[in-house]
Image (cartoon, rainbow, N blue to C red):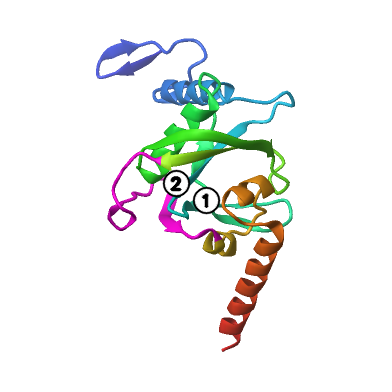
Amino acid sequence: MSHKHGKHVTWSKGRLGPGKGKQQQSKRQNKKKKSRMRKDRRGLPALCLGVIMRKGKVVAVLRKKKRRARNGTVLTWGFPGGLKWNAWGIFWNTERECWEEIHQKVTAVHHIYSRRHPDFPGRVTHFVFCVLKSALPLEKLVFKAGRHILEVRLMAPEEFAAVTTTEIEPRVAGFMGLTTERIKEIRKAAAQSRAAQVGK
């Protein structure tokens, strides 16, 4: 029991004081949020990524939070997307998460592949081919980075292979017109170019 402004205030059992109720409510909401994530049979959360292409170019996002892969590389550029919720399908989740990250509406067209990423084995990743709903030409398209994104850019598949650091799923690479050998060549040339610039 406590006195506040001349009035009796009785704290309910288990509460430590004012403001604690909101903290407990926030914890409960976070717990519910985590429980709504789609998991595979091994209990791994799922991720939906949109492979968005227009006239031979792919939409790439630079994330604010840099995730370190199992092999030591750091995830920087990648496909837009996010966690899948168990109440909705892969296509709907991909469209929703892409909108939140690039602020352009997309239509999910084709499920390319799903797998546990070798660099991030703690998650199942669904790769979905998407197209932009906007009919505007590329030079007039405007992307707006979401709250977890630093930059959104349309780039050629070769440039995407050069700026990304983690493995590109072979089926996704083939969808963009790349092969595993070609990606290795691109990344080797990019690494040599960066080394030359550092040496100047």
- Would you place residue 177 above or below residue 162 in this image? above
- Would you place residue 187 above or below residue 175 in this image? below
Q: Which amino acid does label 1 sit on?
A: Lys
Q: Position of residue 112 (x, y in %)?
A: 60, 38
Asked if residue 136 lies in the magenta stretch, the reply is yes
User: Could you tell me which quadrant the C terminus lies in?
Assistant: bottom right
Residue 3 vs residue 106, the one in the foreground: 106
User: Could you tell me which quadrant the N terminus lies in?
Assistant: top left
> In the drawing, what numbered circle is on residue 65?
1
User: Which element is circle 1 on?
Assistant: strand
Residues at discs 1 and 2 in contact (Cβ within 8 Å): yes
Q: Which amino acid does label 2 sit on?
A: His
Tell me which corner region of the image, top left, top right, bottom left or bottom right, holds residue 161. bottom right
Q: Position of residue 186 (x, y in %)?
A: 63, 68
Q: Residue at x 64, y 37 (%)?
A: 113
Residue 137 vs residue 197, the one in the foreground: 137
> In the drawing, what numbered circle is on residue 153?
none
Task: Specify whether 41 is left or right of 30.
Answer: right
For residue 2, say whether it is visible. Answer: yes
> Reading the chain from its start, which is encountered first: label 1 or label 2?
1
Q: Residue at x 68, y 49 (%)?
A: 170
Which residue position is annotated with label 2?
148
Highlighted range, magenta: 132-157
- Would you place residue 138 above or below residue 8 in this image? below
Q: Which residue is drawn at 52% across and 37% down?
A: 82
